[in-house]
Image: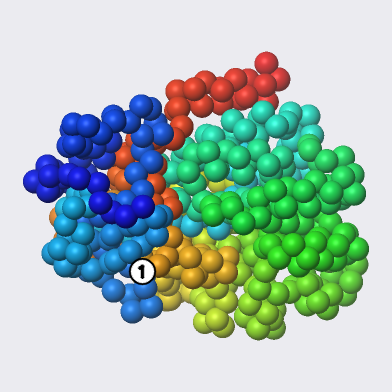
Amino acid sequence: MAVTRDLARGCARSLFLFPVVALVLACQAPTAEAPPDLAGADVTGFVVTGGTIVTFDSDGRVIEDGAVAIEDGRIAAVGPAAEIEGAYPEARRIDAAGGLILPGLINAHTHAPMVLFRGLADDLELMEWLEEVVFPAEGEHVDEELVRWGTRLACLEMLRGGITTFVDMYYFDDTIAEEAERCGMRAVVGETLVDFPAPDNKSWEEAIDYTRSFVERWRGHPRITPAVAPHSLYTVSTEHWIEAHQLAEELDVPLLTHLAEGLAEIDRVLEATGMTSIEYLEYLGLLDDRLLAAHVILPTPNEIDLLAKRGVGVAHCPQSNMKIAAGVAPVPAMIEAGVAVGIGTDGAGSNNDLNLWEEVDTAAKLHKLESGDPTVLPAQKALGMATIEGARALNMQDEIGSLEVGKRADLIVVATDGLHQQPQDPAAKPYSFLVYSTKASDVRTVIVEGRVVVDNGQVLTLDAAEVLEKAAHYRAVLNGQ
Ligand SMILES: [Zn+2]
């Protein structure tokens, strides 16, 4: 569909971040139908105009008073507002004057339904947290409905905070994919494979069969990328790792895992194989560019070179790693070596939120502290991990991660008038402004695949009251009430 909805320009050029749906109601031609319900947010052709565009393109362009034209779910033009508005004189407008327009954020590692485990157990060692709290709770309580409502709560939180793409590893992945699809997000959804009975599949064979049919069902979907997700080297045998990798290769989908995430893992692998985790995967021939590895806290310099050489993507999860005192991933060294490093929240059970702005801010500061060098991870690079580098870690850099013509129209508009942002000129130092002063709550508009899913800070595709009620119900269940 072309950007041709009739709107009087004076009407469309309303106050900054005037709610899009209200704008449509107020300004549409009298014959147009009013949006009947939340689905009315399905606006696919328009111009987002008047804000400062932080493109994250290869030249790192920042365009003051810029505009982005969107057609058929893709970016049709990016440039000065006067130029774009002239080229699309009859297009519907979203006024972003005074705001910052940037690519939608990419959460490179999470376990969405685990929002329902938020705050269930804190301040424990990783293995104690996993083996004494998480795995038993999952075995007893996790079913398809819990996953459905957990995913809805996670999507509410992520969308509200400007995340347009998330990479997930959990169970009942058809349900996670359905919910991500339904709420308008983009997601890479990996069915988690473990050697013990999982909440959904009770044997390895069952899990592989399920994963195959899940992948075949979703492959080719414009927003949902199905994946295969062997949980880790400490929960999946070598034989099963090889099988999982073969399946991902055969179906040509990503492979997601946790890797080099703690001494306990490294010791177990070392004892069994005489090699460290990443060396062992290299020995097995399993390192390649379809692999996205979460954490990677303890790679050796040789292993960092292997990750770069094989094109393995990394999802850095600083707050989760800090909370469990697992160590500090050598992110500057990995970036220096050419590894694509994205950034993730990890599950809210271990973090305890899905706020990617906090992760970016934390990463920028953590690596300064760790290295003693305040120049080691500047704001632009840190935010790059949540945008173009996250896309690169996923091999999706041709589709998302920056605001460039032809890419999928995933973008956000961020308000710049918060007390915590004053007194700064957002256009003068946009990266500093975004990383060190901006909060998830400053996100006003979120567009995924050319569809407005958050308008004036309201998520349009989910019923928040209903989701919160269900979340409370599941918390009571998890508490044994
Ligand atoms: Zn994880």
Residue at horizontal 78 percent and vertical 72 percent from the top: 286
**Residue 329, quarter of the rendered image:** bottom right
Can the viewer see residue 349? no
Residue at horizontal 76 percent and vertical 67 percent from the top: 249
Q: How is the image coloured?
A: rainbow
Name the residue type under label 1. Val
Residue 168 position, x and y percent, is 62, 50
Residue 389 position, x and y percent, is 49, 69
From this view, report whether residue 200 is shown above or below residue 358. Answer: above
Residue closest to the eye, 335 or 253? 253
From this view, report whether residue 435 is shown above or below residue 302. Answer: above
From this view, report whether residue 462 is shown above or below residue 346. Answer: above
Left or right: 51 with respect to 181? left
Residue at horizontal 87 percent and vertical 40 percent from the top: 202
Can the viewer see residue 459? yes
Crowdedness of circle 1 by 10 Å Cα count: few (<14), some, many (20+)?
some
Residue 186 position, x and y percent, is 51, 51
**Residue 67, quarter of the rendered image:** bottom left
Residue 374 position, x and y percent, is 38, 73
From this view, report whether residue 383 is shown above or below residue 226. Answer: below
Farthest residue toward the left? Answer: 10
Farthest residue toward the top? Answer: 481
Indicate the secondary structure of the residue bearing disc 1: loop
Residue closest to the eye, 258 or 154? 154
Residue at image mark 1:
405
